[in-house]
Image: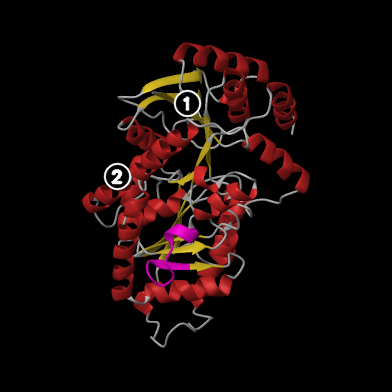
Amino acid sequence: MKVAILFDNFGPYHLARLKAASDRCDVLAVEFGSSSAEYDWVASEASGLKRVVLNQQGSSRALDNREFSSRIETIFKDLRPDVVVVPGWGSRGALLSLLWCVRHRVPAIVMSESTAWDEKRSAVKEWIKGLIVSNFSAALVGGTPHKSYMERLGFPGDRVFLGYDAVDNSFFSEGVRSSVEGLESREEGEKVPARPYFLASARFIEKKNLPRLIRAYATYRKKLAPSTLDSRPVTPDSSWDLVLLGDGELRLELEKLRSELDLQECLRMPGFKQYAELPGFYAGAGAFIHASTTEQWGLVVNEAMASGLPVIVSNRCGCAADLVEEGGNGWTFDPTDEGRLAELMLRISSGKDEREAMGLKSLQIIEAWGPERFAGGLISAIGKAQAPLRTLPVFLLSPLVQLSLKR
């Protein structure tokens, strides 16, 4: 059986999933564009995979709707897939691929990490979304909140499988083991401290909630809020630096805040790092923080857990329900509560034994959420996709797709 798996642009995460799936079925890897409009990934090798790219000259956004649709038609006509696995339902590539599947009566599986809370919802849009989603035969989603959202849209729960959001766990666990402490970034003047530090990794955009993270860190540094979680003393040795990986439109604002709070010597901002550089940063960290106000999943949490780190994760991240065991491998927190975050930072940095136990628990939990789970969930979804749901006639689906493309 030929299974076409579609993504906008292949990053390291996608390739790990595709390679795991290729061990279980005949995978045709379809990439909408050769570069990403959001992530500055270096070109990724896809050795051993059958790979096709719609736009080999750049991002998929460079193609207009007609050209995009024409290239999908040409590629699928040539590949003749038995099943098409589509990334979501909101992008142009997803919608046009679904429309092709309905027209040619090819089962379509949706990959989704949407939750009920990751953005504001309107009744009309949700109704339209439910009509579109009903044209998929099965779904592969991130975790339990994502399955619940599919069911809320009217999709049968017995056709929804978990495992979409996975990273190459062994890449991080093995990379950390082989890394040395005290690594320096490649940016002049930005050194990564040898002792444990808090690590965060995110695009510098509003939803990542980085100003609050920095202010909470300042509170932690000044010891303004005593820990209410236990009676252990906070010693000078427990004061960690914060290393913030990433880049983006808010960089100047964050640098200004760092200066205003007098954190220049303890808040490091080495910039965006390529995939191969990440294990070195995880190796020196003592804990990982992800503070987003909204996040469909949060793959950096997977990375941190595969690196053996305790995690402090916003309860608005889709991964929190399945990956964070409260008090086991870390904690969740309200991303608007800077005081609570500061308290958790105090606790994790002052308890070495607890921290080590939490890191081991992270490794145990994430073992069940690697690329193999993606492959297993996909195979289960393919089995269900052979008995298709009732779909909308093309003459009804097509205008819904066109309406969605204009949004």
Image coordinates for residue 177, horizontal then vertical, percent: 23, 53
Quadrant, the N terminus: top left
Amino acid beneath label 2: Phe
Above or below: residue 284 compared with residue 232: above
Amino acid beneath label 1: Val
What is the span of residues highlighted in magenta in the rendered image? Answer: 320-331
Q: Residue furthest left?
A: 178
Packing grade of label 1 (10 A; few <14, some 14-19, many >=20) is many
* Viewer-side residue, 330 vs 344: 330
For residue 338, which quarter of the picture?
bottom right
Relative to 340, 239 lies left or right? left
- Whether 380 is among the magenta residues is no
Q: Which residue shows up at 73% across the image and 42% down it?
A: 127
Mark 1 residue element: strand
Residue that numbered label 1 is attached to: 83
Mark 2 residue element: helix
Q: Which residue shows up at 41% across the image and 65% down it?
A: 241
Residue 221 shows in this picture: no
Residue that numbered label 2 is attached to: 171
